[in-house]
Amino acid sequence: MSSPKIWTHKGTFLLAAVGSAVGLGNLWRFPYLTGENGGGAFILVYALTIALVGIPILIAETLLGRASRKSPIMGMQYLTESHNTSRNWRAIGWMGAFAAFIILSFYSVIAGWAIHYTGLMFSGSLVGADAATIGESFGDLLASPGLLLTYHTLFILASGLIVGMGIHKGIENGLRFMMPALFVILLIVLGYGVVAGDVGAAMSFLFTFNLADLSLEGWLQAMGQSFFTLSLGMGAIMAYGAYMSSEASLTRTAISIAFVDTAIALLAGIAIFSLVFGSGLEAGQGPGLMFVTLPIAFAELPAGWLIGGVFFILVIGAAITSSISLVEPVAAYLVERFGLSRPIAVTLMITFCWLLGLLTVFSFNYWSEGTITHDWFGRSPFDVLEFITNILMPLGGLLIALFAGWALSREEVLREMSTNDTWFQCWQFLVRFVAPTAVAFVFLRTMPQIDGYLIPAVGSVLLIGAFTAGRTFIQQRQS
Ligand code: PHE
């Protein structure tokens, strides 16, 4: 096929990866999870996971993409062949593609809600409405398969259009225009939140750390969220990494992505909770925080319809820059493997995702709680899909960490990372031991019967890790 494609500028990968990272995860999921889990303590665990597990895996995933310069599935095939490792590592590529399908299918439906709310805000139909009416209007939206389907279709088409135009004309140009615009909008909403809301209450909610507030479930959610928000473990970052300039630094780029992503989640949190607390509302509303609680606050504030509308445009835009990174890995694979044209590859991908999205659409009406279908399975298909991705993402991240940490040779990694010995050792320790332990912790915690053994088990893995790393270090020093 054609020679490898590269982003036009050295910094484009950073822009694209930030675009992928910043999305519904920051604006919708992060605030509501923080609200449900008592604020500061949740943020502390989340930030720690980002630093110790997220950044090392982010480096590893980008590295795999750039070292192979191929789509994740083909890239893993190439890396296992060129490094003579087990073929089983190819599962990383396949699992990622599978997870991308599932995530895009429901991501698109939820982003569609934001389209609906943009309309509601700008039309002024919520101005002065009371809490009950606004709650009902969200219920009405969910109860209408027709509406949900329309927005889902619009959103997925828009994402497909951008990716279909290619990585330069579509993705790069789109991002270069959208990212700054989204940032400006966020600042406007933040400024409004500070002026019109109660920023003091928001700050103390977000930044008062009391670990005892955090339930076990909260710990797990904080770790899961750090994978989701960094777009890790599913090929999105690998696919973008394949186009990354060889000159850009992996470490510096990964730290910047994590920093910007976290900063934006916090800024969004400050804006949202200022408005929520300023209107005397509750933080722990769950997924409805953005679609019910926040509109209630906007309904009574001066010019709330305008800022509210602008805010939901931000949500749609941030979601699109993420969803295109879910389309790209699969589309690029279809182009590479079967020689399809890009528009056809993208059409195939989004058609199947659109169909899969029907499961989510119907989960809120035909198959919602109280219906026979729901009772049969004990949960809705949407819950099942979310559950699967909550497993696939950390699992993908775990395999990426292990592959980069253990299967690739030191030379190979250093060629891409081109860094000093100390940081290399440090990174290697993190991907070899710390990240796998953390992910194992997430999985094991779901099995209560082994609770008593968990701390000793985690401790021994870390000790063995420190010992092995220390020995390798000394041996390398001596040779
Ligand atoms: N990181 C995105 C968000 O925070 C979601 C996402 C996950 C995008 C995985 C791509 C891949 O909304």
Image (cartoon, rainbow, N blue to C red):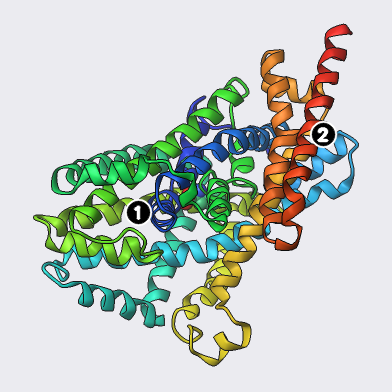
Q: Is residue 407 above or below residue 131?
A: above
Q: What is the three-letter code of the residue carrying label 2? A: Trp
Q: Quadrant of the N terminus?
A: top right
Question: For the residue labelled by badge 2, is the local secondary structure a helix, a strand or a loop?
Answer: helix
Q: What is the three-letter code of the residue carrying label 1? A: Val
Write down the quadrant of residue 81 in the picture: top right
Q: Quadrant of the C terminus?
A: top right
Q: Is residue 316 above or below residue 132?
A: above
Dot 1: few (<14), some (14–19), or many (≥20) neighbours within 10 Å? Answer: many
Write down the quadrant of residue 345 in the picture: bottom right
Left or right of 248? Residue 410 is right
Dot 2: few (<14), some (14–19), or many (≥20) neighbours within 10 Å? Answer: few
Q: Is residue 313 above or below residue 121?
A: above
Residue 324 seen in the current view: no
Left or right of 212? Residue 406 is right
Q: Is residue 198 above or below residue 347?
A: above
Whole-percent x and y of residue 187? Answer: 25, 39
Taking the spot 17% from the left edge, 69% from the top edge, the residue there is 126
The residue singled out by tag 1 in the image is: 315
Write down the quadrant of residue 267 in the picture: top left
Taking the spot 15% from the left edge, 60% from the top edge, the residue there is 305
Q: Which mark is residue 279?
A: none
Which residue extends farthest left? 302
Who comes first in sequence, dot 2 or dot 1?
Answer: 1
Between circles 2 and 1, the one closer to the viewer is: 2
Which residue extends farthest top? 478
Taking the spot 48% from the left edge, 40% from the top edge, the residue there is 44
Whole-percent x and y of residue 133? Answer: 21, 77
CA separation in Å, label 2 and label 1 = 39 Å
Taking the spot 64% from the left edge, 53% from the top edge, the residue there is 393
The residue singled out by tag 2 in the image is: 406
